[in-house]
Amino acid sequence: MVDIIAEQARQEHSSDIQVIQRAVDRYAHWHLWEEKFGFISVPSSMEHKLMSLLTDGQARELGRHLAETFARDFVRYVFKTPNLANVLAAFRYLARPYANFFSLQEHSLEDHTLSFFHDRGVKVSILWEEIISYALRDIAGVEVHIEHSENRITVRYTIPE
């Protein structure tokens, strides 16, 4: 194992300690949740093939199912209280490099606009549109307007008065 760590550090131009720290961080901040919520790793080519077999409607239905069975439980388990701040924290969490679901661009706080980027096609955008919409609308209690394209989901939300 020492050889593996040393080789990884050499490839990354970092120290052995930095490689170990990243591994511990990933374990503490992601791997434990993977086990709790039953995540599995699949090759991207497999995900691409599975998503290509779905119609847009089936991708939307799958997104709704994942939202209802995962989103609320994830926010409650990881962040304890279901509210807007914690939903936004969950999005940031899922955008971490080792989660690898999407990257997230948050615009100014006053703007209430989020952009989610990925490289997995329109059906993945549809799936995430459902999950994001559910999380903001049903967990955080905000009004949501979402647009998607092949590799981007743009979200504008309004906090009710």
Image (tube, rainbow, N blue to C red):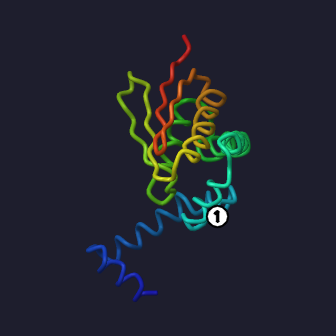
Q: Position of residue 157 (x, y in %)?
A: 51, 24
Query: For numbered disc 1, what is the local secondary structure?
Result: loop
Q: Residue 113 occupies which quadrant of the picture?
A: top left
Q: Residue 63 occupies which quadrant of the picture?
A: top right
Q: Which residue is mark 1?
A: 40
Identify which residue is drawn at 47% across, 44% down: 92
Q: Position of residue 84 (x, y in %)?
A: 55, 29
Residue type highlighted by circle 1: Ile
Tell which residue pokes out farthest to the top in this image: 161
Identify which residue is drawn at 58% across, 42% down: 128
| Direction from residue 13 to residue 137 in the image, left or right | right
The answer to whether residue 62 is above or below residue 83 is below
Residue closest to the eye, 124 or 96: 124
Identify which residue is drawn at 33% across, 77% down: 9
Q: Position of residue 66 (x, y in %)?
A: 69, 45
Identify which residue is drawn at 38% across, 72% down: 19
Mark 1 crowd level (few <14, some 14–19, many ≥20, 10 Å Cα): few
Residue closest to the eye, 137 or 60: 60
